[in-house]
Image (cartoon, rainbow, N blue to C red):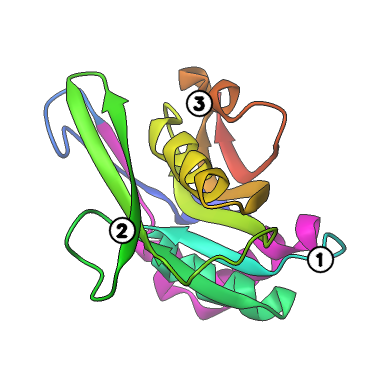
Amino acid sequence: MDYQSLIRDIPDFPKPGIIFKDITPLLANAEALDAVIKDMAAPFKDQKIDLVVGIESRGFIFGPGVARQLGCGFAPVRKPGKLPYHTHSLTYDLEYGTDTLEIHVDAVVKDHRVLIIDDLLATGGTAEAAGKLIAKIDGIVVGFGFVIELGFLNGREKLGNTQVESLINYT
């Protein structure tokens, strides 16, 4: 399926000079949404994934469907103060400042094989931080899955030797 034809470019959003990749037309197409979820899960089918982790917020859209395809559970990784139970957290550097990600303390069991899902891989900082958070709590990051990769930003390089899959790559 031609997913790229269902991605809309929004110039100057959220600020001038940025071309936002809008996935809402893809989400509105039931056939495409179903295919995206199946295609995101496919490279990891035989990797005995215990848990899919979705990065806030669009990782929450795709993560549960991928988890269902893989026959495992799902856990959200969120910004501080958004999860209602006790959390593990990791603060990481941004280009200008820092940010923090959190996950519930009981979401990942030691040696759980975890797949991290999000809609977009850009510079890789948030995905890298999510991977470090999972490793910090003794999970094993098996791979990362994205709908879109902005390959020209080289975010994949921050994810080391871990398997990285994307359905659309803007190079």
Residue 43 in the image: state x and y as whole percent.
Answer: 79, 55
Residue 42 in the image: state x and y as whole percent.
Answer: 77, 62
Quadrant location of the C terminus?
top right
Q: Residues within 10 Å of mark 3 (few under 14, many from 20)?
A: some
Cβ atoms at labels 2 and 1 below 8 Å apart: no
Q: In front: 91, or 57?
A: 91
Provide the secondary structure element on which disc 2 rests.
loop
Can you say whether 153 is above or below 143 in the image?
A: above
Provide the secondary structure element on which disc 1 rests.
loop
Q: Residue at x 52, y 20 (%)?
A: 154
Question: Which comes sooner in the sequence, label 3 or label 2?
Answer: 2
Q: In front: 55, or 82?
A: 82
Between the C-alphas of marks 2 and 1, the distance is 24 Å
Residue wearing tag 2: 78
* Amino acid type, callout 2: Arg
Q: Which numbered marker is on residue 113?
A: none
The magenta span reads 19-45
Question: Which comes sooner in the sequence, label 2 or label 1?
Answer: 1
